[in-house]
Amino acid sequence: MISKCSIFDGNQVFNFGWQCTIIGLALWVSLLGGEKNNASLKFDRSAGEKQTLTMPDGTVIGYTAYTHLYYVTNVEDSVYQFLNVFVPDGATQSTPIFLRTYVGGYMASAAGMPQADDASGRALKEGYVLVIPGTRGRNSTVRKNGKTIYTGRAPKAIVDLKAAIRYLRHFDKEMLGDAEIIITDGTSAGGAMSALMGATGNNPAYEKYLKEAGAAQERDDVFASVCYCPITDLTHADMAYEWLYGGTAGRQAEDEAHKRVSAELAAMFPAYVNGLGLKKADGMMLTSDNYLDFIKSELIRSAQIAKNAGADIPDSIGFKFSAQASFGAPPINGGKTAVAGGLPPMRQGGMKKMAGEYITDLDMPTYLNYVSTKTKLKTVPAFDSKGVAGNGASGENDEFGDENGSSVNFTEYSASQNGTAISESVKEYAYLLNPMEQIGQDDVTVAQHWYIRHGAIDRDTAFPVPLNLALKLQNTGKDVNYLLAWNRPHSGDYALDEMFAWIASIVKKP
């Protein structure tokens, strides 16, 4: 029996359970046109429906559901442009709001119901108001005058999410929950959207799109952002990818055309990272000369935390250990676990070391080859691939396309390989989708609190992408909790005990 739907975006498969019903309805509505113009912003507190959710431990959570709430007045796509709100029993006007986006692969995401096995259900259990907005994406379409129109190409998804935040502020007095304490959460492209919600608050550059959509005239900044493996900084992601993985066996086995592209992209990364002017926690400048050592230190930190919690780590993947547990240097993090909720074991090959041992070093070429064999590396280039060395278009190339369904290059390098130039509109969209370029702007309100996780074996984007984001936020005075989570692949909503303990600490919830 098939119990889940699967969507393939060219790089990975996203599996859904309850979403099958939503997707089926969405497809049916799309056939009818998918349009609902001139809606009005409404919220009726008396119109909620009492429901329950049974958690994995058997706990039954009571809540009131408010569904199909349109967050813009000019609804282009009625399949996606609304949100659902779930108010747990006992919530008050001051209860924090947890906004969970299910965007994946920059595709459309339907507003859904809380799930017992991810952060949405856990948020209700913790007593937070839960909001799940739908958003248009690169694959969403409607029919207009007999023609298929793509409704969700850049920057439409983040515009929809900003409109949803403005809706929550617009009805803050009528709705239980505090719109001044919104915590966003997302994974992969959804992690990028969560980062954008946190990093682009009130930026006037989005205003024309929000006005066109009919969003409420309210602020759209948020209190905190949770970002799992954010696929972001697309403008520089290809060069970071090749700089990190260009020396691996898989890359060296590529044909000459792809090896040339890999080498050229890798050579562009030093100038970019040096120009960021980032500083590590110790105040030392982060440059291309010490960046690999910085990544190594973060991987050692992650592995040490995992080992202190009892994980088995083989020495075959590049780690070196003290001769015995009584090695003089203290364990990183004081021996405290920062990977609550369980650790995936590592039991393949190599001698197992005892918990409590101190990790002294890591051979990075060995480790990077290990990561690249856990999951095959993406093509060269990994993101802006269209037309480069004979490659087809990626999902990101589609994201920057137009309403007619085109796919285009969005980096100067890839465009030059095709003998073309990037249009001004695509340059604007790339900026609007890049939190790195907006953090620190005088007219942008950036969330104060950040929780960033990227798996230590996640090759969907290179480690520098989430690390650069974390350091830039930290360098601008933000509270940032980040980690290359040990032995985690491309995934999210893990270690929820840890994540919700962090949320409780920032909202001062006992």
Image: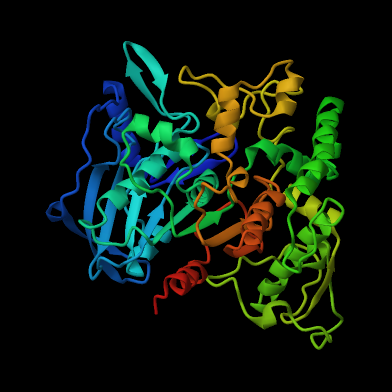
Position of residue 85 in the picture relative to residue 485 (left or right): left
Where residue 443 appears, as percent x and y from the top left, is: 51, 46
Where residue 315 appears, as percent x and y from the top left, is: 82, 67
| Front one among 225 and 333 | 225
Up the image or down, 114 lies above or below 357; here it is above
Where residue 193 appears, as percent x and y from the top left, is: 50, 45
Query: Which image quadrant is residue 362 in?
Result: bottom right
Up the image or down, 61 lies above or below 185; here it is below
Give the residue drawn at x 23%, y 68%: 89
Up the image or down, 472 lies above or below 157; here it is below
| Front one among 165 and 365 | 165
Q: Quadrant of the N terminus?
A: top left
Farthest front residue? 442
Up the image or down, 223 lies above or below 220; here it is below
| Front one among 236 and 34 | 236
Position of residue 444 in the picture relative to residue 347 (left or right): left
Numbered circles on residues, count? 0
Give the residue drawn at x 31%, y 51%: 168
The reply to whether residue 218 is in sight is yes
| Front one among 207 and 130 | 207
Where residue 337 appears, as percent x and y from the top left, is: 61, 77
What is the basis of the colouring in this image?
rainbow
Give the residue drawn at x 25%, y 68%: 92
Query: Which image quadrant is residue 48 in?
Result: bottom left
Give the residue drawn at x 50%, y 21%: 402
Position of residue 314 in the picture relative to residue 64 (left or right): right
Q: Quadrant of the C terminus?
A: bottom left
The reply to whether residue 492 is in sight is no
Farthest left residue? 46
